[in-house]
Image (tube, helix red, strand yellow):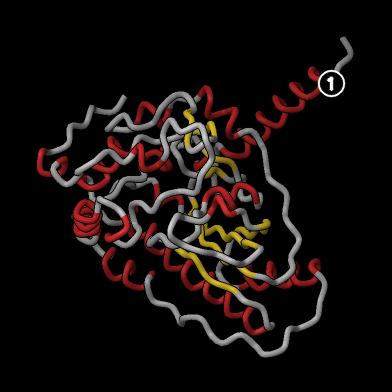
Amino acid sequence: MSEKFTPRPETLALMPVSGNPINGLGETAQRRPSPFFWHPVDKHPFGELQAESRKYSRQCPGAAEIFMAAHKHPGLGPIAPERKPGSAGEFSAAAREFALANEADLVGMTAMNPLWVFEGYEITDSWVIMLGFGHNYDKIVQLPSDEHNGVGVTDVAMQYARGTRASYALANWIRSQGYNARAFPGPNADALLLIPPAIEAGLGELGKHGSMISRQFGSGFRLAGVTTDMPLLATNRDTFGADDFCANCQICTKACPPEAISDHKQMIRGVERWYVDFDKCIPYFVEASTCGLCIAVCPWTRPTVRPNLLAKMAKRREKKTGEASAPT
């Protein structure tokens, strides 16, 4: 169990309201998400707290320069006047090949869902291509970072920078084929909520710590998205047992200094899922310069452990499915 964290009064003073109702905690009806942390400060009530978090994280050695690089990209080029002919299968294969050749580690595609668009924004494209970027495990396990050791947060910044470059490169490739495309990288939030389409596109499952877990990287990866009207084929969801494992695992729950990770799912905007308490998590995130401790300690993130977990959960799911289908 980690040492219990108590936020400083000056940090709490920057939280004028609770963030959990804005996130939809306890709501039984589905709705679009509200703009929140990492959105422009005029769209949510936590602008001063957001600025404070950036000030601290930029103090980590090497982080400022890499975070600046994460915001640099060539922009969106023009859409070619004529659409290149091709089938959805051909375009899907070509887009996947391009993304993997341009820094993406994971690629998935899914039809657009209006519930993935933040209130006050609009996306008219019919498809989402989700990209994943794996962390360097030896670096990410050094989270959280501070003014003395910035290794962990600089790797976070590096993956966001890769996501920016890769998503804009893919969007511009699609536009060169005559189709519309927009890029949605982190760390700044925009119109597109990234985790739900990434789950639907098969990049992994949602973990108890509020981040995704993939077969290839465990909890150690970041996301970027590209929306488009290019015809594509959806990839399948990938259910490999991470959600079932999280139901019984207590490692991230016990490691979380502000005790923000619940041991049970909660109703969020009409969906029962894992949820991290914003009001507990973010003050620690601000004062610790960053966090990421939960993904660093996650058993799925450890390269030497993950293969055994995959095999174990596959056997458990096979047994469960066999028992469920056995005649009574």
Residue projecting furthest to the top? 328
Kindly identify the residue that appears in the image at 49 percent across and 27 percent down.
265
- Residue 159 shows in this picture: no
Give residue 85's position: percent from left, percent from top: 80, 81
Residue projecting furthest to the left? 10
- Residue 259 shows in this picture: yes
What residue type is disc 1 on? Ser
Residue projecting furthest to the bottom? 81
Give residue 109's position: percent from left, percent from top: 67, 59
Nearer-the-camera pick, 206 or 24: 24
Residue at numbered disc 1: 325
Give residue 305's position: percent from left, percent from top: 55, 36
Neighbor class of circle 1 (other Cα within 10 Å; few <14, some 14-19, many 20+) is: few
Left or right of residue 196: residue 39: left
Looking at the image, is 146 positioned above or below residue 159? above
Give residue 196's position: percent from left, percent from top: 56, 48
Left or right of residue 148: residue 90: right
For the image, the number of numbered tags is: 1
Nearer-the-camera pick, 300 or 47: 47
Kindly identify the residue that appears in the image at 54 percent across and 72 percent down.
182
Left or right of residue 108: residue 7: left
Kindly identify the residue that appears in the image at 51 percent across and 56 percent down.
117
Kindly identify the residue that appears in the image at 31 percent across and 29 percent down.
259
Looking at the image, is 213 positioned above or below residue 114? above
Q: Quadrant of the N terminus?
A: top left
Nearer-the-camera pick, 68 or 16: 16
Q: Quadrant of the C terminus?
A: top right
Left or right of residue 128: residue 232: right
| Res 230 → quadrant | bottom right
SS state under label 1: helix
